[in-house]
Amino acid sequence: MLSQIELGRSVPTITVLSRIAAAFETPVAAFLSHNSRDRVHVLRSGDSEELRSPDGHFVSRALFPFVGARRTEFYELRLAPACDRQSPAHAAGTTENLVVASGQLEIQLGGASYTLTRGDSIYFGADVPHTYHNGGDGIAVAYLVVTYSQPVSY
């Protein structure tokens, strides 16, 4: 069937298209877009959105463009020495996956504390309050992927 579609000898029904999409683990809409540039977004470092604490000790830089709907966000976090960043509970089913690129971070979560250094990572349910703490002497840099159970739109 795929060969016939590729050769233009057959037009798939929506049922067949759904099955093909499921096999490739991609939405049907991906096959319907005529403009491949809509699926590519270059984000220059100077153009990314930044969230800064009032004292400037915490900086979160979005590493994704704020367009469309998504279930995943990707951030670079920078915490000055002795910086605490408290995060309220996210929506039910939200998870975070964080890897430390440099420095040291302590993640406080549900009464437990996890100390991470360069190269260490942690994955946790973020639907409870949690805190990031830099207990080291230098700036801590980490990369954070937040995954929501429902798509968020921008």
Image (cartoon, rainbow, N blue to C red):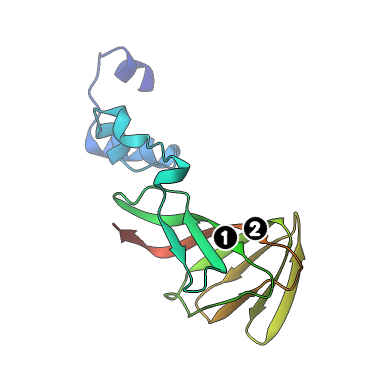
Residue sitting at the far bottom: 111
In this rendering, would 95 be left or right of 66? right
Callout 2 touching callout 1 (CB < 8 Å): yes
Point out residue 65 in the picture as x, y percentages from the top left corner: 37, 47
Q: Quadrant of the C terminus?
A: bottom left
Point out residue 53 in the picture as x, y percentages from the top left corner: 48, 71
* Residue where numbered disc 2 is placed: 141
Decide: few, some or many residues near mark 2? Use Cα within 10 Å; few <14, some 14-19, many ≥20. many
Q: In the depicted view, which residue is nearer to us: 27 or 65?
A: 65
Report the number of numbered marks.
2
- Badge 1 marks a residue whose secondary structure is strand
Vertical placement of residue 55 versus 152, above or below:
below
Q: In the depicted view, which residue is nearer to us: 22 or 109?
A: 109
- Badge 2 marks a residue whose secondary structure is strand
**Residue 125 placement: quadrant:** bottom right
Point out residue 39 in the picture as x, y percentages from the top left corner: 34, 36
Three-letter code, disc 1 = Leu
Mark number for residue 77? 1
Q: Residue at x 48, y 80 (%)?
A: 88
Three-letter code, disc 2 = Val
Point out residue 46 in the picture as x, y percentages from the top left corner: 44, 44
Q: Residue at x 34, y 43 (%)?
A: 27
**Residue 79 placement: quadrant:** bottom right
